[in-house]
Image (cartoon, rainbow, N blue to C red):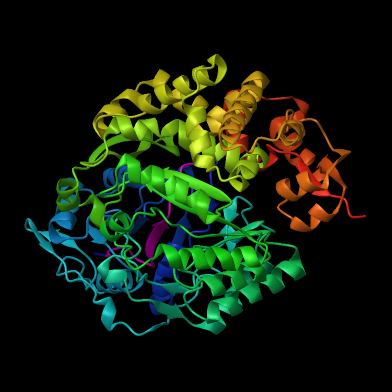
């Protein structure tokens, strides 16, 4: 109950760890909530928005609020709860509210979360603007201890009191005040570390079991007003400080015909301002032609079609049975016909998937023509169907735990870190089988996605060999250098997991272990690319191994051409960037037209006897590498720095650029 004189002081927080800089985004989520409250109670409330934990910690000590609201995700769960306890210790009368998707949304799940977190007064599991605003109104009116408003959950006398919002009864048009146009988010647009977020619709009609976007309560797609979206795009362009990345946080951008017009509006900003350079979108699953038009409109060089699996039974188990492989092939063709690259995501550990079906999916992804293939582990998310006890039991799901990259720090004198729960086995795939894929996944990431050995693999593919089969053979190499790398990688991969969150938290609660985590923890894909970069003989041994496997298979098929294989070895050696600090260079080299038609995938080059090509490392690439690997003029090619460099864009520096020189 509000008993102070003056305005009701509200702190709204969308916290990120600031120990290691990762991708920080403008707090649009709590911005919507703050704008809604301001619109209703402008003269009665004082709202402050927080992103960085240390700023919140200082504010809580100096001037505790009347209400503390926290967004709740997998990457800030334990951090949120630290501040809930802290604020209650400073002032037990502070009303605490948490909202977001990181919770089981059945009645027992909500009750258990509130009961096990006594410093938390209210939880809002879905959209928060109206429930939070109604709660603020009740507190202003002195009714905060009675039945909570619709959409707010609370424990009263040991019982859960919660009346959920029925989103199917909501209007199709979302009419909420804009946190951008109100100026509430101006300080974050002025922060160069913050990536602007934009939202054009809510809801997802696809019920993927591992995701919380399309749960039943949020399956209906609702739209924000188009004129407001246009105003926000223009406003962000004017008020931001030239951030090169923007993100649209819709679950299915492209699902509506108007999305192409929105993309064209962003294109106008890009042409006028020179930014953003990259626009991240999650494309709609069933609008291939429109997705291509959107990608072309914003000037992107690639799109994404997440297949997750190519096995129909597995897709059915995942809630993706309405996404057909043949339709995906058509969508890929749309991209290829427009000279655009297309990537895909693949998940390991899906319900009903076994080792054979996962391997078939990898092979199928290459056969479909994906230019980049990203295999991922499945992080279990509370609120998703795959995380429920029923699904765990049905599919024999076994999980383990590890730290979330970048999500750790010391606040209020306490080591805090977030825990990722991931699928490590099911009743159709053992943990050992899952571990066996680690090296193959890494080889796809390094040899294919980065382009390092792609010319050899493309040639093999044109000769009827599947790159996944080639890389699988390489993963079983007995040669010393790749074998040592692979064995160490697999050991490290298996060793990063803990049996329980408590075990992990206890381990990293030891100062020495925590300091090692902060100083050297890296994603394994980037870490082992960094290790390979530090050891040129390993990279050379991988090239030799790939060429040997391809040569052996081609000889067996009667397709071996020694001249082409020799040219491929030469071309690949020149393509690999062996020194990130090599500086700008340009080098021309002539190759036969037939060979160039293969590596550049351009049949017109067959008509030429020789083709002049240029290998180069452009000035912008040299500058990027210099900035990150030679800070303050001092070279830093340590493993931790190399891994971070690869994480923030250095993957694109693994190859020199190559192009055909026009006659």
Magenta region, residue range:
2-17
Specify the farthest residue to the right.
663
Please tell me which residue lies in front, 467 or 98: 467
Residue 7 among magenta residues: yes
Residue 414 seen by the camera: no
Residue 571 seen by the camera: yes
Position in image of residue 643 (x %, y %): 58, 32
Position in image of residue 605 (x %, y %): 80, 54
Residue 441 among magenta residues: no
- Residue found 31% across the figure and 35% down from its top: 401
Please tell me which residue lies in front, 100 or 311: 311
Say which quadrant the C terminus sits in: bottom right
Left or right: 578, with 358 as reference point = right
- Residue found 65% across the figure and 43% down from its top: 459
Say which quadrant the N terminus sits in: bottom left
Q: How many marks?
A: 0
């Amino acid at each position: 109950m509000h008993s102070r004189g003056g305005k009701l002081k509200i702190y709204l927080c969308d916290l990120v760890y600031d120990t290691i800089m990762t991708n920080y985004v403008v707090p649009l989520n709590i911005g919507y909530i703050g704008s809604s409250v301001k619109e209703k109670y402008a003269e009665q409330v004082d709202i402050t928005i927080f992103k960085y934990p240390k700023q919140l910690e200082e504010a809580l000590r100096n001037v505790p609020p009347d209400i503390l609201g926290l967004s709740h995700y997998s990457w800030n769960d334990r951090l949120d709860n630290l501040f809930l306890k802290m604020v209650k210790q400073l002032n037990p009368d502070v009303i605490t509210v948490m909202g977001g998707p990181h919770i089981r949304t059945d009645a027992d799940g909500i009750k258990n979360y509130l009961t096990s977190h006594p410093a938390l007064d209210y939880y809002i599991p879905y959209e928060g603007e109206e429930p939070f605003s109604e709660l603020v109104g009740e507190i202003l009116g002195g009714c905060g201890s009675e039945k909570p408003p619709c959409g707010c959950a609370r424990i009263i006398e040991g019982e859960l009191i919660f009346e959920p919002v029925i989103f199917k009864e909501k209007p199709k048009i979302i009419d909420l005040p804009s946190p951008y146009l109100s100026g509430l988010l101006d300080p974050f647009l002025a922060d160069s570390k913050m990536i602007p977020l934009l939202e054009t619709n809510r809801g997802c009609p696809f019920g993927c079991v591992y995701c919380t976007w399309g749960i039943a309560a949020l399956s209906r797609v609702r739209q924000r007003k188009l004129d407001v979206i246009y105003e926000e795009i223009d406003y962000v362009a004017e008020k931001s400080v030239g951030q090169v990345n923007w993100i649209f946080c819709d679950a299915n951008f492209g699902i509506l015909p108007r999305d192409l017009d929105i993309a064209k509006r962003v294109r106008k900003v890009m042409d006028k301002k020179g930014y953003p350079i990259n626009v991240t979108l999650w494309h709609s699953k069933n609008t291939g032609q429109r997705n291509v038009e959107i990608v072309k409109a914003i000037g992107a060089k690639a799109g994404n079609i997440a297949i997750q699996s190519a096995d129909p039974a597995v897709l059915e188990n995942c809630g993706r049975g309405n996404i057909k492989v043949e339709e995906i092939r058509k969508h890929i063709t749309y991209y290829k016909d427009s000279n655009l690259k297309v990537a895909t995501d693949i998940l390991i550990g899906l319900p009903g998937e076994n080792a054979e079906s996962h391997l078939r999916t990898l092979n199928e992804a290459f056969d479909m023509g994906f230019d980049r293939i990203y295999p991922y582990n499945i992080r279990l998310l509370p609120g998703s169907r795959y995380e429920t006890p029923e699904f765990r039991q049905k599919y024999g799901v076994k999980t383990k735990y590890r730290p979330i990259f970048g999500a750790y720090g010391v606040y209020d004198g306490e080591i805090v870190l977030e825990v990722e729960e991931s699928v490590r086995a099911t009743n159709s795939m053992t943990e050992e089988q899952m571990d066996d894929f680690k090296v193959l996944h890494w080889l796809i990431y390094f040899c294919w996605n980065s382009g390092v050995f792609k010319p050899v693999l493309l040639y093999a593919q044109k000769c009827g060999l599947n790159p996944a089969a080639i890389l699988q053979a390489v993963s079983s190499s007995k040669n010393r250098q790749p074998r040592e790398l692979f064995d160490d990688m697999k050991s490290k991969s298996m060793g990063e997991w803990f049996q329980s969150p408590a075990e992990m938290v206890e381990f990293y609660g030891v100062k020495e272990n925590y300091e090692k985590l902060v100083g050297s923890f890296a994603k394994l894909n980037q870490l082992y690319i960094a290790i390979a970069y530090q050891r040129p003989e390993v990279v050379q041994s991988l090239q030799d191994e790939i060429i040997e496997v391809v040569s052996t298979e081609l000889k067996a098929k009667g397709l071996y051409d020694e001249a082409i294989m020799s040219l491929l070895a030469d071309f690949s050696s020149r393509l690999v960037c062996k020194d990130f600090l090599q500086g700008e260079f340009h080098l021309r080299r002539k190759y036969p037209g037939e060979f160039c038609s293969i590596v550049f995938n351009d049949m017109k080059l067959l008509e030429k006897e020789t083709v002049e090509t240029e290998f180069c490392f452009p000035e912008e690439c040299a500058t990027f590498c210099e900035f990150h690997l030679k800070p303050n003029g001092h070279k830093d090619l340590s493993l931790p720095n190399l891994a971070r460099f690869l994480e923030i864009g250095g993957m694109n520096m693994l190859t020199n650029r190559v192009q055909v020189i026009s006659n």
